[in-house]
C-alpha cells in the first residue's frame, strides 16, 4: 500500500517550505494530461473560492469593530497572513508594485529579443516606461516589443488606459570638441568589481535595478547614500526592484509577500534569521562600482 505523505504544518515546517511545496505541486499539475490538469485546477479553484467566502466575512466583520480593525492591521503584517490574504485578493499591492510585477513577467521575453523595459512613472490610468536595446528604435521588431509591454499591462491591469514610452536622451556630441574627461586616466576596475550605472542615471530613483552578466543588483538610495544588494528577497528569492521604500523609516518592503528589510543594513525585520545579501559599493568619478564577484 502506498504511503501517503504527511501534510506539513507550521509546527514542523516553516513558511518558505510550505510555499515551495505549493509551487512544486502546482508545477506538477501543469505537466498532467489536459483533462487531468483541468480537473485538478478546477478543484484548486473551488477550494480557494470556498475559503475566500469565509475569509471575506471574517475581514468585513473585523473592520466593523474598532478593536477588530486594529487587530486585523497587526495580522496583515505577518507574512503568512499577508500571503493568504493576497492569494484571495483581500490585500492588494499598490498600483506601482502591480505594474512592476507585470514588467517582471515580460522582461525575459524582452531580453530574449535584445531589449529591456524599465518603469518610469505610474498614475491612476497611465503607465510610462523606458525601452532599451532593440526596443529603442522604429523597426518592426521594436514596435512588436512595445506592443507586448502595452498588451501585458492592460491585460493584467484593466484600469490602465494608456502606456507611454519615455524618450531616451540622445548622446550629446560636439564636432571637433574633445571632452576633458577623455584626457584623464581611464577609470580602473579591480578584479571582482564591475562598473555600474552613473550616479546621474539613478539619482532620481529610490530603488534602481542594474543587471550585470548573471547578477541582478538592487541599488538603494537612502539619506544621501547608496547601498547595493543582490536583487533577491531573502524569503523566496523574488526580485525586489518593484518594492516600496519608506523614506522616513528606511524600511524596504518586498512586493511579493510583504517581507520588510532595513534598507541600510539588509536586516530582515519580518524574519530575523533572513537577510539580504549586501554587495560592496563605492562611487568614483560619478560612477557606481559594485563588487559582484568574490
Image: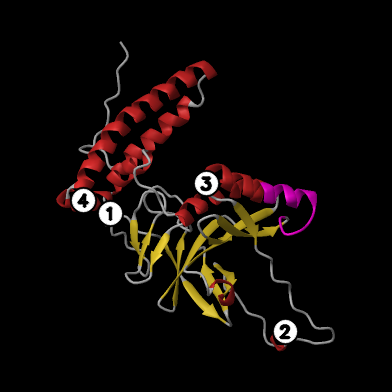
Sequence-first tag of 3 and 2: 3
Work out whether residue 82 or residue 273 is closer to the camera in this orientation and state it.
Answer: 82
Residue that badge 4 annotates: 69
Answer with the quarter of the image where residue 52 lies: top left
Return the residue found at the far top.
1
CA–CA distance between discs 1 and 4? Answer: 24 Å
Sequence-first tag of 2 and 1: 2
Sequence-first tag of 1 and 3: 3
Queried whether the magenta region covers residue 287, the answer comes back as: no
Percent x, y of residue 118: 59, 59
Above or below, 100 against 109 in this view is below
Asked whether the residues under the numbered discs 1 and 3 touch, taking CB atoms below 8 Å apart as contact, a structural biologist would say no
Q: Which numbered disc, 1 or 4, marks the residue closer to the eye?
A: 4
Q: Could you say which disc has been placed on residue 157 in the image?
A: 3
Image quadrant where one finds the N terminus: top left
CA–CA distance between discs 3 and 2? Answer: 46 Å
Asked whether the residues under the numbered discs 3 and 4 touch, taking CB atoms below 8 Å apart as contact, a structural biologist would say no
- Whether residue 113 sits left or right of residue 283 in the image: it is right
CA–CA distance between discs 2 and 1? Answer: 48 Å
Residue that badge 2 annotates: 182
Mark 1 nearby-residue class (10 Å; few <14, some 14–19, many ≥20): some
Work out whether residue 253 or residue 269 is closer to the camera in this orientation and state it.
Answer: 253
- Magenta stretch mostly in which secondary structure? helix
Queried whether the magenta region covers residue 144, the answer comes back as: yes
Return the residue found at the far left.
67
Residue that badge 1 annotates: 271
Amino acid at each position: 500500500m502506498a504511503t501517503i505523505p504527511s501534510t506539513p504544518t507550521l509546527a514542523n515546517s516553516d513558511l518558505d517550505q510550505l510555499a515551495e511545496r505549493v509551487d512544486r505541486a502546482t508545477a506538477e499539475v501543469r505537466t498532467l494530461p489536459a483533462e487531468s490538469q483541468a480537473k485538478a485546477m478546477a478543484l484548486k479553484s473551488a477550494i480557494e473560492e470556498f475559503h475566500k467566502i469565509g475569509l471575506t466575512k471574517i475581514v468585513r466583520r473585523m473592520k466593523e469593530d474598532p478593536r477588530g480593525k486594529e487587530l486585523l492591521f497587526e495580522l496583515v503584517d505577518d507574512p503568512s497572513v499577508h500571503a493568504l490574504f493576497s492569494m484571495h485578493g483581500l490585500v492588494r499591492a499598490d498600483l506601482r508594485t502591480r505594474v512592476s510585477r507585470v514588467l517582471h513577467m515580460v522582461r525575459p521575453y524582452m531580453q530574449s529579443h535584445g531589449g529591456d523595459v524599465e518603469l518610469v512613472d505610474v498614475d491612476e490610468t497611465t503607465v510610462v516606461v523606458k525601452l532599451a536595446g532593440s526596443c529603442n528604435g522604429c523597426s518592426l521588431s521594436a514596435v512588436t516589443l512595445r506592443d507586448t509591454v502595452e498588451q501585458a499591462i492592460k491585460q493584467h491591469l484593466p484600469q490602465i488606459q494608456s502606456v507611454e514610452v519615455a524618450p531616451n536622451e540622445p548622446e550629446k556630441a560636439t564636432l571637433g570638441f574633445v571632452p576633458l574627461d577623455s584626457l584623464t586616466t581611464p577609470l580602473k576596475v579591480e578584479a571582482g568589481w564591475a562598473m555600474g550605472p552613473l550616479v546621474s542615471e539613478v539619482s532620481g530613483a529610490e530603488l534602481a535595478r542594474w543587471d550585470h552578466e548573471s547578477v541582478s543588483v538592487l541599488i538603494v538610495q537612502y539619506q544621501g547614500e547608496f547601498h547595493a544588494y543582490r536583487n533577491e528577497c531573502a524569503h523566496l528569492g523574488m526580485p525586489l526592484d518593484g518594492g516600496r521604500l519608506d523614506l522616513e523609516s528606511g524600511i524596504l518592503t518586498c512586493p511579493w509577500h510583504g517581507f520588510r528589510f532595513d534598507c541600510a543594513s539588509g536586516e530582515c525585520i519580518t524574519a530575523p534569521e533572513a537577510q539580504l545579501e549586501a554587495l560592496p559599493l563605492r562611487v568614483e568619478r560619478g560612477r557606481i562600482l559594485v563588487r559582484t564577484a568574490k
